[in-house]
Image (cartoon, helix red, strand yellow):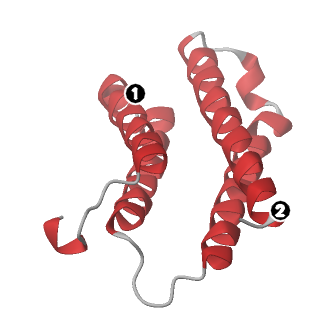
């Protein structure tokens, strides 16, 4: 494994933790009707972190140099990422659905972590 891959992987893990932390803090502030949610940095930072997270994931994918199709676990992880984005947005913007979408977003997040750690053999056709 190259040094660049290891660096990207470690950065990716730290960004995962930071992304989850920012999501939870913003939800807490939302629940408390905090004025801190209106700050410019609070609005921009999660998007910047998530963009870096996606770029480090893409960088690792390119370094692994998959010649044909992506493994099934990675395809499922990308699907869960899209679901996490949708549920996270709904959790932040739609009060009637908040509890449900928080649970769904965190479930997607947990699923992505499970897939990243265990890399189970999943065929795309099994999905």
Q: Which residue is mark 2?
A: 3
Q: Label 1: few (<14), some or many (≥20) within 10 Å?
A: few
Gap in angstroms between the C-alphas marked 2 and 1: 45 Å
Q: Position of residue 34 (x, y in %)?
A: 69, 14
Q: Position of residue 75 (x, y in %)?
A: 38, 67
Residue found at x 71% / y 27%: 37
Asked which secondary structure carries label 2, the reply is helix
Quadrant of residue 45 within the rendered picture: top right
Q: Is residue 63 left or right of residue 36?
A: left
Q: Which mark is residue 18?
A: none
Quadrant of residue 56 within the rendered picture: bottom right
**Nearer mark to the viewer, of 2 and 1:** 2
**Which callout, 2 or 1, points at the residue further toward the start of the chain?**
2
Q: Position of residue 106 (x, y in %)?
A: 42, 32
Residue that sits furthest to the bottom in the current view? 67
Residue found at x 46% / y 54%: 81
Residue that sits furthest to the top in the current view? 32
Q: 74 above or below 125?
A: above
Q: Is residue 3 left or right of residue 70?
A: right
Asked which secondary structure carries label 1, the reply is helix
Q: 75 above or below 21?
A: below
Residue found at x 42% / y 50%: 86
Q: Which residue is mark 1?
A: 95
Q: Position of residue 22 (x, y in %)?
A: 67, 30
């Amino acid at each position: 494994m190259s040094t660049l891959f290891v660096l990207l992987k470690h950065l990716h893990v730290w960004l995962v933790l930071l992304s989850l932390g920012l999501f939870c803090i913003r939800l807490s502030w939302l629940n408390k009707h905090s004025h801190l949610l209106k700050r410019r940095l609070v609005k921009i930072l999660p998007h910047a972190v998530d963009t870096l997270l996606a770029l480090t994931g893409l960088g690792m994918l390119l370094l692994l140099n998959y010649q044909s199709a992506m493994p099934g676990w990675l395809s499922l992880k990308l699907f869960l990422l899209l679901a996490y984005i949708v549920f996270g947005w709904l959790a932040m913007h739609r009060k009637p659905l908040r509890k449900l979408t928080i649970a769904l977003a965190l479930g997607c997040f947990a699923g992505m972590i499970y897939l990243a750690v265990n890399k189970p053999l999943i065929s795309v056709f099994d999905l």
